[in-house]
Amino acid sequence: MKVQEIIERIKRAPETDIILLSELEYGKPPRYALFDSDGTISTLREGWEKVMAPVMLAMICGETEPTAEIRQEVAQYIHDSTGINTIIQMEHLVEMVEAHGLVTDDQVLDPAGYKRVYNERLMVPVGERIGQIIAGNVNPSDFTIAGVLNFLRALHNQKVEMRVFSGTDEADVQHELEILGAAAFFVRIHGALSRYEDSNKEKILQELMTEGNLSGPEVIVVGDGPVEIREAKKRGCLAIGVASDEVNRQGWNEAKVERLANAGADILIPDFRCAADLLNLLCLLPV
């Protein structure tokens, strides 16, 4: 099914909750599941793109007004890099700053410096949301993708071993999943470490499969970004793309539909309200 056909189908029937893009091989249920966090489980960082874009534009242009071309370049890069470690995005920012040459050498930071600037700005709204939860003004579920906690609980009850792999710093993703009541479902939460080589999604997935002597269908990968979907398909894992609307916490995000379908997702869902049907597809009992 072509991407445009998928989007037209969603427009005609927005209540559609599962779209199969591959022929599934039914048999044994999966033994392991790897989840992305931001946009797949948590919406605490919803709007990160709107924080990153102004940071990148300011670092590239300095006092110069960004051109339409630079704005498009930044927007396209953020669109394409969803799901990778933040430090890699900041390494690319260094390349863009140097390529455009609009700021003096003493204004150019290293990737870690740009990441500090970005994180400081992002953690303002994230901190406010966490504060609302801690104060009891909102429920933790108000910052999760609809139905995801029930889906995680069902997988846990079915003895599926679950892990998180995220491009967010490991201490932050651990803390945020604890706040949301999701951390206890996972045997391991992997986030970004100081060295990209130690914590990227490709490495984590490959190590899991090698150490467990696993074949592809024994592992499901669930995420809203193309990075984890592509890595899953390289290894024959079942890739579930979550085309989530992070603002409303449910329903389809057409931009994500396009990214995830192009990355090779086997299954597309907008959220986890379809948990029972999804568990049935995975040969697991809905509990």
Image: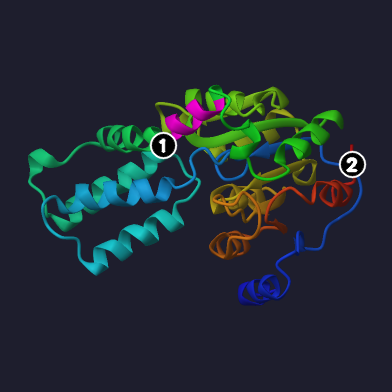
> Which stretch appears magenta?
126-133
* Residue 263 x, y percent position in the rendering: 59, 59
Residue 37 part of the magenta-drawn span: no
Task: Quote the CA–CA distance across marks 1 and 2.
Answer: 35 Å
Three-letter amino acid code of the residue under disc 2: Pro
Query: Disc 2 marks which residue?
Result: 286
Q: Is residue 131 magenta?
A: yes
Residue beneath the point at 90% across and 46% down:
283
Coloring scheme of the render? rainbow
Q: Secondary structure of the magenta portion, mostly? A: helix
> Which mark, residue 125?
1
- Looking at this view, is 239 or 5 the one in front? 5
Query: Looking at the rendering, which quadrant does residue 100 occupy?
Result: bottom left
Mark 1 vs 2, N-terminal side: 1
Residue 214 can be seen, yes or no: no
Split into 4 quadrants, where in the image is the C terminus? top right
Q: Residue at x 25, y 45 (%)?
A: 94
Query: SS of the residue at dot 1?
Result: helix
Pinpoint residue 81: horizontal percent, then vertical percent: 44, 52
37 above or below 179? Answer: below
Q: Is residue 170 above or below residue 95?
A: above
Question: Where is residue 24 shown, x and y percent of the image?
Answer: 83, 58
Residue density around tag 2, few if under 14, some if 14–19, many if 20 or more, within 10 Å: some
Q: How far across and how far down the image is residue 213, in percent?
A: 75, 33
- Does residue 261 sit above or below 89 in this rendering? below
Q: Residue furthest front?
A: 137
Name the amino acid, label 1.
Pro
